[in-house]
Image (cartoon, rainbow, N blue to C red):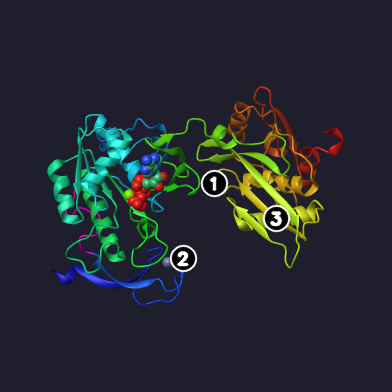
Amino acid sequence: MDKSRYKMVFICQQCGKESPKWLGHCPSCQEWNTFVETQVSSSKGVGTLTQIGSPVRELSQITAEEMPRLVLPSAEFNRVLGGGIVPGSLVLISGDPGIGKSTLLLQVSAMIAQQGKKVVYASGEESLYQTRLRADRLGVKGEGLYLLAETDFEVILERMEETSPSLGVIDSIQTVYLRELEGAPGSISQIRECTLRLMQWAKLSAIPLLITGHVTKEGAIAGPKALEHIVDVVLYLEGESFSTYRLLRGVKNRFGSTNEVGIFEMREQGLVEVENPSQVFLSQRSKGAIGSVVAPTLEGTRSLLVEMQALTTTTSFGLPRRTANGIDFNRLLLIIAVLTKRAGLRLSNQDIIVNVVGGLKISEPAADLAVALSIASSFSDKEVDPNLVAVGEVGLSGEVRGVPQLERRLIEAARQGFTRCVGPMVSLSSLTPPQGMELTGVNSLREALRVGLKSKSNM
Ligand SMILES: Nc1ncnc2c1ncn2[C@@H]1O[C@H](COP(=O)(O)OP(=O)(O)OP(=O)(O)O)[C@@H](O)[C@H]1O
Ligand SMILES: [Mg+2]
Ligand SMILES: [Zn+2]
């Protein structure tokens, strides 16, 4: 083997940061003891993406039609990909073990094969027989779908070259290895080098590749995080273990907007698209419950209605505890502080739990107002109108701030049968409400609590 093509560096196993010397603490992801000495290709080696001697071409001479996207019949999957799979792109699907990555990829492969195109599915994790069993369960037919149970990287690429498919799948990147590299399959040096080469191969052959990577806590197997800066598209398949719902979230996309979310349900016959997600997430809601408020959130370009629940109880011992499930913990602390200081709620001796129903994670501040209302509702034991949705960012001085794309959120709320919305005056005042929707604009959190909480007398 040609040693000069490789050099030794230290790489963080968590985030992939490189350093010429060992570091105890990663300056990039703040983890401790994650640097491992690793063999990587030196800059002029195989890892570079440029074709040596490639000619210059005028931008205007390059047309996008030369290479149409592979469009899938699954609307949810297309949405996350920004309209289909781009030729020559490398897509990483990462997720917890057992979440359904192989299922998703087999289904996608079958969809492409059904269009009369060839797909090579290389599995390093399961035997051909196991894949066949899953295919039977999913009702996948075999025409055009070529399976390969192989972990030797070069053999996989050779087979792909021979078959010249429209799509290549590698399940998973952590099981393949390059013979000439030191390190076991799954080590950072292996997964990095293999991914770099896949990237190069995909670009030169114009064949798109989907690879999976499972998230690892710690240990010898390096996580997909370290690959995110290399690949074109990163999708996370997420879900709580207790729930059958799966979210496919775009985290990085060189060819489309990120933060798009596809929503699926894991059934016996595989991942099935959820057609009306708001309805699903609200279906078990008991109307008129105390401490429950619905927020029209935005996931990518889609509005999704989610239920926020809060429970406050008097602290019985020591410091009050705060628990946030599905929202950012610091955001919860901020909202509690503003409720205490600007709206006069005495929460300092209260344990507070906030939960987003259905195992969803909401990161946008537009959900602040619904969280604040649900806490206030539980604390004061007052009901919130079950036909009301609340939206708005809460500022430190107790003001309710504007949110983006309010119109889209209101249309979804109206579609799900909600009739009232409390939200920021600045955004609501310039809007024409959807049919049957009454808008109440507020400037402050105090005002929002006054209009949002039903007093006991009129219940
Ligand atoms: N008969 C079945 N009915 C319903 N769901 C099933 C059935 N068999 C398997 N599943 C679901 O499929 C999941 C496993 O899917 P899959 O093997 O695609 O996951 P994975 O992410 O590829 O896992 P790994 O990390 O082990 O490769 C199980 O956790 C389970 O939820
Ligand atoms: Mg799998
Ligand atoms: Zn790091």
Residue bounds of the magenta highlight: 44-56
Determine whether 37 is above or below 342 in the image: below
N-terminal of the pair, mark 3 or mark 2, is 2
Q: Residue at point 70% right, 53% down?
A: 335
- The number of numbered badges drawn on the structure is 3
- Under tag 2, what secondary structure? loop
User: Where residue 383 sits: x, y (%)?
Assistant: 76, 39
Q: Which residue is mark 2?
A: 29
**Relative to residue 415, is residue 5 drawn left or right?**
left
Residue 133 in view, yes or no: yes
**What distance separates the C-alpha of mark 3 from that of mark 1?**
18 Å
Q: Nearer the viewer, mark 3 or mark 2?
A: 3
Q: Residue at point 46% right, 43% down?
A: 247
Q: In the image, which disc is placed on residue 352?
A: 3
**Relative to residue 5, is residue 220 drawn left or right?**
right
Please tell me which residue lies in front, 272 or 5: 272
User: Where residue 219 sits: x, y (%)?
Assistant: 37, 67
Q: Nearer the viewer, mark 1 or mark 2?
A: 1
**What distance separates the C-alpha of mark 3 from that of mark 2?**
30 Å
Q: Which residue is mark 1?
A: 359
Q: Residue at point 24% right, 60% down?
A: 47
